[in-house]
Image: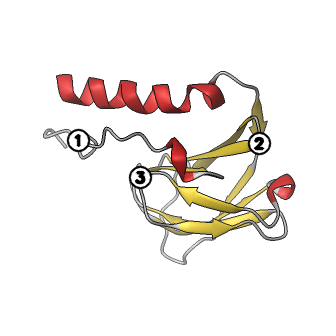
Amino acid sequence: MLLLCFTLAAELSALEMFLVNDDHPVEVAIIDDLFDPPGLGVRGLLKHSGGDSLLILVNEDDHRHLGVDVTGLTPLNGRTLHQLYGDKQAVVRRGGIVTRMQPHEVKLFCTSPRFTTKQKKGRNYTDAGE
């Protein structure tokens, strides 16, 4: 548990410059699958710091979403968003991106991959009670 706390603190420290700035709402729409159960959906938030931007997406459902349409990103048109702690990239086109999300997944996309902290040990924590 101590390692988890250390890892979380390292990640928050790396993103502090974004987290203390104003929120910029984005629109998030689920591209429904015929068999998707109802749920809370995915929430999104855009933060800026200097010339960089951070997109935070949170799937609040206990099921995956194969299509999550994020719009309201027009100022980022043509820019590449790098998934922090992942290998995905998305180029913002027509003010948006589309991604997939696993149950209760949090995705962080940033205009620069340099905001990934080097402290990765402990990121794979899961609750044994689940």
Q: In the rendered view of the protein, which quadrant contains the C terminus? A: top left
Q: Secondary structure at mark 3?
A: loop
Q: Is residue 125 visible?
A: yes
Spatial separation of the CA atoms under disc 1 and disc 2: 29 Å
Q: Where 124 sits versus 67, above or below?
A: above
> Which of labels 1 and 2 is toward the front?
2
Spatial separation of the CA atoms under disc 3 and disc 1: 12 Å
Evaluate if marks 1 and 2 touch, with contact meaning CB atoms under 8 Å apart: no
Q: Nearer the viewer, residue 10 or 39?
A: 10
Spatial separation of the CA atoms under disc 2 and disc 3: 21 Å
Along the horizontal axis of the image, is 64 left or right of 110? left
Residue at mark 3: 85
Residue at mark 1: 121
Q: Earlier in the sequence, mark 1 or mark 2?
A: 2
Q: Amino acid at mark 2?
A: Gly
Q: Amino acid at mark 1?
A: Lys
Q: Residue 107: give x, y in percent of width and height.
A: 50, 51
Q: Crowdedness of circle 3 by 10 Å Cα count: few (<14), some, many (20+)?
A: some
Q: Crowdedness of circle 1 by 10 Å Cα count: few (<14), some, many (20+)?
A: few
Q: Hey, which quadrant is residue 118 in on the image?
A: top left
Residue 9 is tagged as none
Q: Residue 84: give x, y in percent of width and height.
A: 48, 51
Along the horizontal axis of the image, is 44 left or right of 102? right
Residue at mark 2: 51
Q: In the rendered view of the protein, which quadrant contains the N terminus? A: top left
State the residue at coordinates (36%, 29%).
Answer: 8
The residue at the far left in this view is 128
Q: Where 5 sits versus 119, above or below?
A: above
